[in-house]
Amino acid sequence: MAALAVQSCAVPQPSDPAWSVQKIDSASLEFEYPPDWSVREVAALANDPAGGVSYHVYDADGDLMAWLDTGIITDQVCMGMQEPVTYTEYDSQPMPELKSAQGTSQRFVYHSVAPSAGEAMVTYAVVSAPPPTAEQASCGLFDFFTLTESSGGRFSGVVPPDAGSGVSAHLEKAAAYAGSDEFRDVKRMLVSLRSSD
């Protein structure tokens, strides 16, 4: 397993009045997003009996940039891939303002996993887990964070491959994306997710 990490421990920027704030009172959460982006509540994917909410975030062109779901109970079962995979972490930042009733530390991560054959996955997400071991990476990306005592959530998005491109081109796109203005906004938005109570 190869890992290339560009760690960022910078303190999140103070609230920018030009950015909008989405408050989610039922989950005691809030996050900021660019003024020309939009947030829509959608049918909840929650499987926790206590409930949850789901939101989609779209950029100015109407492209889906991230989804936020709460009330998610996960039980990952790793079947393992048949070939070696390469896990790469392009960026990471702690998120101390997002509290978990389970006592975990949350962080933002931008990462990819690429099997020796097949398609690579490139995502940005809020997670509770530390960087995976080689065995864990072979299970794919686990883009969830813990929140309540019984469940967690997901605030994540994907960097899709360009049409007709192969794994190498997709990973080159992923590395270049880390330096883009769009990524800067995506990261700032996800890192701004915080507990509001």
Image: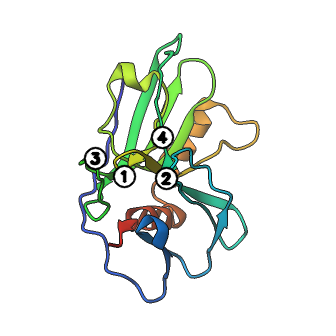
**CB atoms at circles 1 and 3 under 8 Å apart?**
yes
Residue 50: which disc?
Answer: 2
Amino acid at circle 1 = Thr
Q: Is residue 176 left or right of residue 170?
A: left
Indicate the position of residue 137 as horizontal and vertical percent values. Answer: 42, 26
How far is disc 1 from disc 4 in space, using C-alphas?
Answer: 10 Å
Q: State the residue at coordinates (34%, 32%).
A: 3
Of marks 2 and 3, which one's residue comes earlier in the chain? 2
Amino acid at circle 2 = Ala
Tag 4, which secondary structure?
loop
- Name the mark nearer the viewer: 1 or 2: 2
Of marks 1 and 2, which one's residue comes earlier in the chain? 2
Which residue is situated farthest in the right direction here? 164
Residue 148: which disc?
Answer: 1
Quadrant of the rendered structure where residue 16 is?
A: bottom left
How far is disc 2 from disc 3 in space, using C-alphas?
Answer: 16 Å
Tag 1, which secondary structure?
loop
Residue at which label 3 appears: 102
Residue at which label 4 appears: 73
**Above or below: residue 188 compared with residue 48:** below
